[in-house]
Image (cartoon, rainbow, N blue to C red):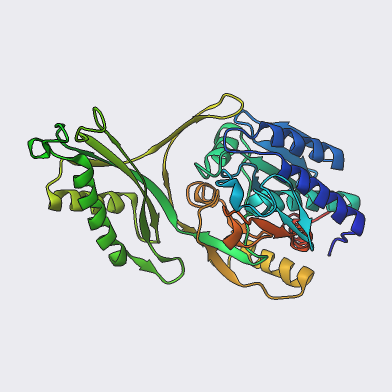
Amino acid sequence: MNIGFGASQAEAMASFLQDLVRIPSLSTHEEAVAVRLAEEMQHVGFQDVRQDRIGNVVGRIGNGNGPTLLFDGHMDTVDVGRLDRWSHGPYNGVVEQGVLHGRGSCDMKGGLAAMVYAARALMDAGVELNGNLYVVGVVQEEPCEGFGMRVLVEEEGVRPDYVVLGEPSNLQVRVGHRGRIEMQVRVWGKAAHASSPSLGTNAIHNAAKLIFGIELLAPRLATDPFLGQGTIAVTEIESHAASRNALPDVCSFYIDRRLTLGETERKALAEIQGIINTEEMDAEVTVSEYVAASYTGYQCRARNAFPAWVMGEDHPLVQALCRSVRETLGYRPRIGRWNFSTDGTYTAGVANIPTVGFGPGEEQYAHTQNEQVRLNDVVDAARVYARLAIEILGQR
């Protein structure tokens, strides 16, 4: 059964999405967009709408007599960067030739709006789902993917049978991605006056030697036929010295390490420790921690280690999504992976909940200053989500 999606519904969804894009919602500052999301859920007729302890917005429809399907969309965005690089402004919500521009339009307020309006379309069509359909606006996904979902599942007691991630996939099916570890390397030196560098040890110079060794490591990282090769990148560096005319006695840098299947946290740490040992440096490598307070005041603390995950193409959830795309949009979707990381690191990688991805927007626009999404794609995503809900939950 395909659900109709009329012009009035499409216009209302586009207006709602514009509202979401116009509200800045950096991680830990999602309160205003959470209020707007809850308002829309209540307006379109969700049976239950609430905010949980960390600030996730949780909406539900269905009779509760069957399985639970959860649509996952994060409310937070990354920062905007240089404003002069934006052709339309990050928070203007400009629509031009059917394309909505602005921060979060692609990653991933477009998917979130489509999920809300998929539920509305089901209710407008009089469909009573035989189970629970949750639409969840998640907080703090950008800095610590999966943490908001962990709170929902483990502390709020909402454990779905299936999860759909609305991250941008260009309306293709995604079934996994590499894992991620953020590591901190601290390198110690010996302070001295900069006019007499021979009397000390420059921690920055020693860190540079380690970074060069990391660059040489990159081509040797493991490869998986589906997820591709692991990657490694130094993303931030900082040092401390008594003054700018003194040698720094400590230098720290951070590493973004993407893990393909078969790679582990232990292996990734050992690789860096091996470089430290080879260079005979006074240094240590650790997994960094994410520490922050959510907008509700919930104290978040987690290690920045997120596993890789892959769903088999023959899994019933994957096949149901492919059928929904084919029967709704008329094409056979490509099954692939994301390059970036998502809440699937928790739902599939930790909690072992069957998880798939499908959303409007192209991955190449995420986190860029020309972020955008085609409004027709948002409508198509909503139609597929509605069809999938019927496929998974059935109806009375």
Residue 121 image point, x, y percent: 85, 53
The picture quadrant where one finds residue 238 is top left
Left or right? Give the position of 197 relative to 51: left
**Does 224 sit above or below residue 160?**
below
Quadrant of image for the N terminus: bottom right
Residue name at image x 72 percent, y 75 percent: 331
Q: Residue furthest front?
A: 195
Q: In this rendered view, identify the residue nearer to me: 158 or 89.
A: 89
The picture quadrant where one finds residue 87 is bottom right
Left or right? Give the position of 156 relative to 19: left
Residue 311 visible here: no
Residue 32 visible here: yes
Left or right? Give the position of 197 relative to 266: left
**Does 337 sit above or below residue 69?**
below
Q: In this rendered view, identify the residue nearer to me: 78 or 125.
A: 78
Left or right? Give the position of 18 relative to 84: right
Residue 229 image point, x, y percent: 39, 66
